[in-house]
Amino acid sequence: MDSSAGRRAYYCLPMALANQAGWFMLNSHSFKVRWTGGEGSDALEIFYLTGRRPFPAVSTFGNGVLTFHVPYVFRTPPGCNLLVRGPANCPKDGASPLEGLVETDWSCATFTMNWQITRPNHTVLFAEHEPIGMIVPERRGGLEQFQPEIRAIESDPDVSAKNAEWARSRYNFIGAIRTHPVDVDPSGLWQGHYFRGTSVDGSEASEHQRSLRILPFSDACAEDDRARQAPTERSPALIRRPENDPARAVAGAKPAG
């Protein structure tokens, strides 16, 4: 999206909101990876460019699958899963993210983020600090409450009429752009009804979001360390949490609101 002409991709509200709908997991080391096309784990060649051990990405499963070890145990509220997916709208030539749904309200195990290298003998760069995964809390059973069905649009006269009005408006708008191209102002490339939360006739949506207010992760470990380091009358010594304390590797993902 950053490389789109004039960053016009960010004018697409559904894409912009998808970018905000979760938390990115960032790559800690810069490295290149190449798959020879073989089935074994040794068919994936990884060349680290920055950083020291431990290296986050390894070849474990074979068949060109690159595995990132995520050094956290995630905890969600009861009945809430964690969708582990690729970073939204971040396509990578030669590699495709694999997704998983994890029951993080009870599991005490870590999970991995995996990418399928799709093209043999092609070098793929994973840069330091680039997103290599995205975590999205989901209420367990939420999808199963929906009963999808296909209906004729004419069965809802109001929706049918508004859709026809939108289609005519869109056709005329695209025709006008082709006749008089917009070169300077990228906002002139679309009508903006959806962005504003309005229909073509001007009626407003009862609920509409232009951005998501996702809370960042707080560092409870740092807060605990500061509290332990603060001298008191009863305990004047500075106490640090041991580096091997598993509590350092617990992250609680809770949806905002």
Image (cartoon, rainbow, N blue to C red):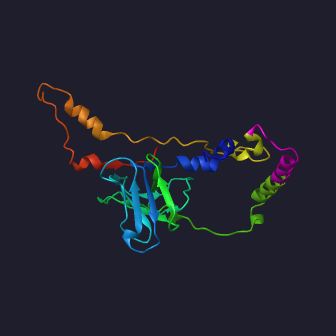
Q: Can residue 175 be found in the magenta stretch?
A: yes
Residue 4 percent location from the top left of the image: 65, 47
In terms of secondary structure, what is the magenta stretch mainly?
helix
Region rendered in magenta: 169-185
- Left or right of 74 on screen, residue 22: right
Is 221 colored magenta in this rendering? Answer: no
Identify the residue at the far bottom of this view.
39
Residue for point 85% across, 49% down: 178
Q: How many numbered marks, from 0 up?
A: 0
Q: Quadrant of residue 113?
A: bottom left
Q: Residue at x 27, y 46 (%)?
A: 248
Q: With respect to residue 232, does 33 lie above or below?
A: below
Nearer to the camera, 66 or 32 = 32
Which residue is nearer to you in this view: 158 or 243?
243
Left or right, 200 with reference to 87: right
Q: Determine the residue located farthest toward the right in the rendered image.
A: 179
Reply above or below: 34 against 21: below
Query: Can the viewer see residue 61?
Result: no
Q: Residue furthest top?
A: 233
Residue at image location 87% in from the left, 44% down from the top: 180
* Residue 234 position within the rendered picture, expressed as x and y whole percent measured from the top left: 11, 28
Q: Looking at the picture, how far across and down is residue 210, in whole percent?
A: 61, 42
Taking the image as drawn, is residue 211 in sight?
yes
Q: Nearer the viewer, residue 198 or 61?
A: 61
